[in-house]
Image (spheres, rainbow, N blue to C red):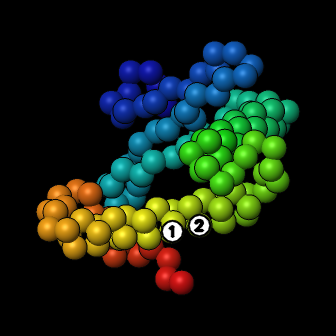
């Protein structure tokens, strides 16, 4: 396709060996007259593609580790020196959330028994019933 064609075209370039930009995409009408997107093959070598994939995977793993570190720092029954398996972290975090929920219920009952009005935003209502909650 020429540079002065009327079809929109996204140009793909490689700015350095470690950076990959979007592949080139063209819109061209098919036999029925509708536009159909086609992706041109990348100009990266197999070695560059593999390096990019490895770097992306390492970044994904680092992000997961970082979020688990955040959970450990927010959960008092987890310590930095303890077994850091994902199962252990998730189990103890879920137990802590259950404990907080139970404490919230007890405090609300205590307040109500003493005639203290509890604002709605202080009452835990649980997850929305949108399928994201897990039945025990």
Q: Nearer the viewer, residue 70 or 39?
A: 70
Q: Which mark is residue 95?
A: 2
Q: Which is nearer the eye, 94 or 102?
A: 102
| Residue 23 place in picture, x, y as percent | 57, 35
Q: Is residue 18 above or below residue 97?
A: above
Task: Identify the residue at image location x=46%, y=39%.
Answer: 26
Q: Nearer the viewer, residue 53 or 35?
A: 53
Query: Quick one: which residue is furthest to the front in this view?
Result: 114
Residue 94 is situated, as x and y percent measured from the top left of the image, at 57, 65
Determine whether 2 is above or below 94 in the image: above
Residue at 71% in and 38% down? 62
Q: Quadrant of residue 133?
A: bottom left
Measuring 56% from the left and 61% from the top, which residue is drawn there? 96
Does the residue at mark 1 contact the one at mark 2 (Cβ under 8 Å)?
Answer: yes
Asked if residue 114 is positioned above or below residue 56 in the image, the reply reads below
Residue at image point 33% right, 55% down: 34
Q: Position of residue 80 (x, y in %)?
A: 75, 42
Q: Answer left or right for 109 relative to 41.
A: left
Q: CA distance from mark 1 to mark 2?
A: 5 Å
Callout 2 secondary element: helix
Per the rendering, the mark at residue 98 is 1
* The C terminus, quarter of image: bottom right
* Percent position of residue 52, x then y: 74, 33
Other residues around mark 2 within 10 Å, as few (<14) / some (14–19) / many (≥20): some
Residue at the farthest top position: 16
Q: Is residue 103 left or right of residue 66?
A: left
Determine if residue 49 is in view: no
């Amino acid at each position: 396709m020429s540079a002065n064609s009327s079809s929109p075209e996204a140009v793909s370039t490689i700015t350095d060996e470690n950076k990959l930009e979007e592949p080139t995409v063209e819109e061209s009408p098919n036999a029925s007259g509708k536009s159909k997107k086609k992706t041109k093959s990348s100009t990266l070598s197999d070695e560059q593609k593999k390096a990019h994939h490895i770097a992306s995977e390492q970044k994904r793993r680092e992000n997961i580790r970082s979020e688990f570190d955040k959970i450990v720092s927010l959960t008092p029954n987890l310590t930095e020196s303890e077994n850091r398996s994902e199962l252990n972290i998730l189990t103890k975090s879920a137990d802590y959330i259950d404990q907080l929920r139970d404490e919230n219920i007890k405090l609300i009952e205590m307040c109500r028994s003493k005639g203290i009005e509890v604002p709605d935003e202080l009452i835990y209502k649980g997850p929305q019933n949108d399928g994201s909650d897990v039945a025990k």
